[in-house]
Amino acid sequence: MATVEELIRAGTARLRASGSETARLDAELLLGHAIGADRTVIVAHPAAPVGDGAAERFEADLARRERGEPVAYIRGFKEFYGLAFAADPRALIPRPETERLVELAERDVLRRLTVAPRRADAPALRVIDVGTGGGTVAVALAVALRNRGIAGEVEIIATDDAPDALDLARENAVGHSVGDRILFLEADLLPPVVVMPWDLVLANLPYVPTGAVATLPVAASFEPRAALDGGADGLAVIGRLVERLPEALATGGVGLLEIGSDQDAAIQHLVGERLPGWTCRVEPDLAGHPRVARIERGNG
């Protein structure tokens, strides 16, 4: 009977040969999945024997990963913002850098609710997550607000033009007990008619230039291309949302849009060109890379 370390060593060698840049981590996660244990247990007990059934599951998962399938799809979930989200080919796999978008949104909501006194009859803050995919941003924000005891003061809407992705988003919302806190709508970016504007417009839209999609790691080929391909310059979809911000944002409202790490100057130029007089400040992620464009009306 093989030990944890023996299987990890062999699995790491196979995944490294197949081109994985995180071969050891992948092997540890997959063995943990096969055994039904957290990766920390795998790391802490290298000499533990692995039963034949778990070893066979590990072998099957290794074969899938060797063909390029993302670990998140093999395991069926991905950790994000301290939560586990169901992950499958219906939607893009949550990326760690997107946590910055949720963090900034949570901070903005808290500022609006706590810095200035609010009337007892003040309406709820309105937030929309555009292009929600598997619901990662909307659900993570809803859970964070619930944990702070202020979920009832915020209305969250999440949109996507892919019905399958919305189904996954609803599953994630229900799985985290916020299904009643988020309204999911099928729409191309925003609803066709904005009846009431939002205080906060969030979006993690596709921003990879079309020509660069083919150069992404093979794992990305398993994800929906529409969730990655941002057009010739990577900002085609984001640009369409920027053009609708004047009608989408309430007075004093803010747009928080995730961008690629090399799109700082491009998003500044795009906003300046399409929304004269507006301001655009790009917030860095934890690695220091440009990540979230903060867009709002100018003071003039």
Image: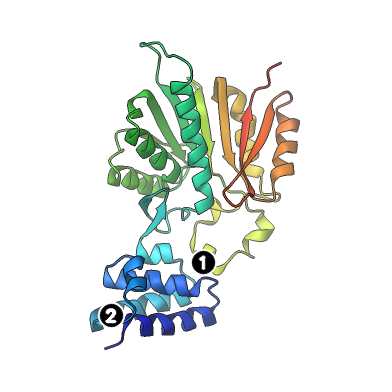
Q: How is the image coloured?
A: rainbow
The mark lying in front, picked from 1 and 2, is 2
Image quarter hosting the N terminus = bottom left
Query: Does dot 1 land on a helix, a strand or a loop?
Result: helix
Instruction: Please tell me whether residue 104 is drawn above or below residue 222 in the rendered image.
Output: above
Residue 70 falls left or right of residue 85: right
- Could you tell me how far apart the alpha carbons at marks 1 and 2 are, in whole angstroms? 30 Å
The residue tagged 2 is 48
Quadrant containing the C terminus is: top right
User: Splitting the image into 4 quarters, where does residue 89 fall?
Assistant: bottom left
Say which residue appears at 48% left-offset and 40% top-offset. Answer: 102
Q: Give the image location of residue 75, x and y in percent.
A: 36, 65
Check residue 219 in the rendering and tell me which mark sits there, or answer none. 1
Residue 21 coordinates in the image, percent (x, y): 55, 71
Query: At x 29% / y 34%, what residue is drawn?
Result: 180
**How many labels were placed on the picture?**
2
Give how far across and how far down residue 72 sits, in percent: 41, 62
Residue type marked 1: Ala
Report x, y in % for residue 96: 50, 53
Q: Mark 1, residues whose alpha carbon is within 10 Å: few (<14), some, or many (≥20)?
A: some
Residue type at the position of mark 2: Ala
Q: Secondary structure at mark 2?
A: loop
Label for residue 271? none
Asked if residue 74 lies left or right of residue 278, the reply is: left
Q: Is residue 263 above or below residue 245?
A: below
Residue 67 placement, left or right of 243: left
| Residues at circles 1 and 2 in contact by the CB criterion of under 8 Å | no
Tell me the quarter of the picture where residue 143 sits.
top left
